[in-house]
Amino acid sequence: MYTSQHDISDERWSRIEELLPGRSGQPGRVAKDNRLFINAMLYIAKTGCMWRDLPAIYGPWDTVYH
């Protein structure tokens, strides 16, 4: 998987992984990849780029936005 300086570390991910919605066994839809979503949010927050400029590795910008 692609990693960048903006991605969440394994240590920090292990702390929040169980707190996020969309996991198997919970009501509602299962998230495709919560870590990828968090990494996309961090990228936007750290770089200040516009949503449409989000690198494709994070998925479609409008899906991440919504």
Image (cartoon, grey):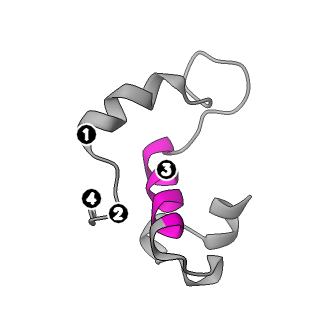
Tell me the magenta residue range.
33-45
The secondary element bearing badge 2 is classed as loop
Q: Where is residue 16 in the image (x, y as percent from the top left)?
A: 44, 29
Disc assigned to residue 1: 4
- Mark 2 crowd level (few <14, some 14–19, many ≥20, 10 Å Cα): some
Mark 1 vs mark 4: in front: 1
Q: What residue type is labelled 3?
A: Ile
The count of marks equals 4
Residue at numbered disc 3: 38
The secondary element bearing badge 1 is classed as helix
Q: Where is residue 47 in the image (x, y as percent from the top left)?
A: 46, 75
Question: Sequence-wise, which precedes: disc 4 or disc 3?
Answer: 4
Cα distance in 3D space between marks 4 and 3:
14 Å
Residue at numbered disc 2: 6
Cα distance in 3D space between marks 3 and 2:
10 Å
Viewport quadrant of the N terminus: bottom left
Cα distance in 3D space between marks 1 and 4:
13 Å
Q: Position of residue 11 (x, y in %)?
A: 25, 34
Q: Which amino acid does label 2 sit on?
A: His
Q: Residue at x 27, y 45 (%)?
A: 9
Mark 3 vs mark 2: in front: 2
In the rendered image, residue 3 lying in the magenta stretch gets the answer: no
Q: Which amino acid does label 1 sit on?
A: Asp
Which is more toward the observer, 65 or 47?
47
